[in-house]
Amino acid sequence: MNNTALISSFILTFLSSIGLVFFIKASVKPRTKNMKLAAEQEADLLLKQLKEYFSDRAYRIIDVNADQNKLTFEGIVRPSWFLVFFLTLLAAVGALCFGLAISMLVPEFGQYFIWLILVSPLAGIFYWQKSKRPEQVDIKLEGILSEGSSSKSLLSITGHRDELSALQRAFSLKGYQE
């Protein structure tokens, strides 16, 4: 292979490695979302069920604002074993490719660069340490919607997007557009 092909392969591998580092870094980024949801239950019953639901999911109430009909829950997000394994595997493949690219450019030191694969568990350790953090869910009762003979409770909820999806499925909540 000529020198130009080696250098261009190295540059592409280097850029991919930079993208991998940012991907691993983004894996611990908070993904907070705000949603307006409509529920079939009455407001008092719904708030009681929400308290039980979040209590069962190891959240605790940290703030109650009765004037604004607002509850704030806090819980610890558990890291995902799948993501630990996946990020470690991605880092291993990326380090192997980077090591191979360097070993082709500098053949006399090539056998040493393959050892870069040993740093790949640091990606899993980074994710595990940074992703275990407190998360908050804010629930505000916006009001009651009347639709014919039935009424619905309108909630404004802010929290982690995965937690909101689980909540939406558990209570059959529908998205609300004004």
Image (cartoon, rainbow, N blue to C red):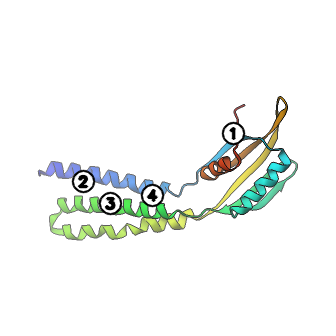
Residue, far front: 149
Q: Residues within 10 Å of mark 3 (few under 14, many from 20)?
A: some
The kind of secondary structure element at disc 4 is: helix
Tell me the number on the disc at residue 24.
Answer: 4
Residue 68 rendering spot, x and y as whole percentages: 84, 47
Q: Could you tell me the amino acid type at mark 4?
A: Ile
- Circle nearer the N terminus (3, 2): 2
Judging by the rendered image, the residue that carries numbered circle 1 is: 174
Q: Residues within 10 Å of mark 2 (few under 14, many from 20)?
A: many
Q: Could you tell me the amino acid type at mark 1?
A: Lys
From mark 3 to mark 1, how far is it between C-alphas?
42 Å
The kind of secondary structure element at disc 3 is: helix
4 vs 2, front mark: 4
For the residue pair 70 and 165, the one nearer the viewer reads as 165
Is disc 2 in contact with disc 1, using a CB cutoff of under 8 Å? no
Instruction: Name the quadrant containing residue 149.
Output: top right
Q: Could you tell me the amino acid type at mark 3?
A: Val
Tell me: 86 left or right of 132: left
Q: Could you tell me the amino acid type at mark 2?
A: Phe
- Circle nearer the N terminus (4, 3): 4
From mark 4 to mark 2, how far is it between C-alphas?
21 Å
- Residue visible at 69% across and 44% down in the picture: 172
For the residue pair 119 and 58, the one nearer the viewer reads as 58
Judging by the rendered image, the residue that carries numbered circle 3 is: 93
From mark 2 to mark 1, how far is it between C-alphas?
50 Å
Q: Is residue 111 above or below residue 159?
A: below
Judging by the rendered image, the residue that carries numbered circle 2 is: 10
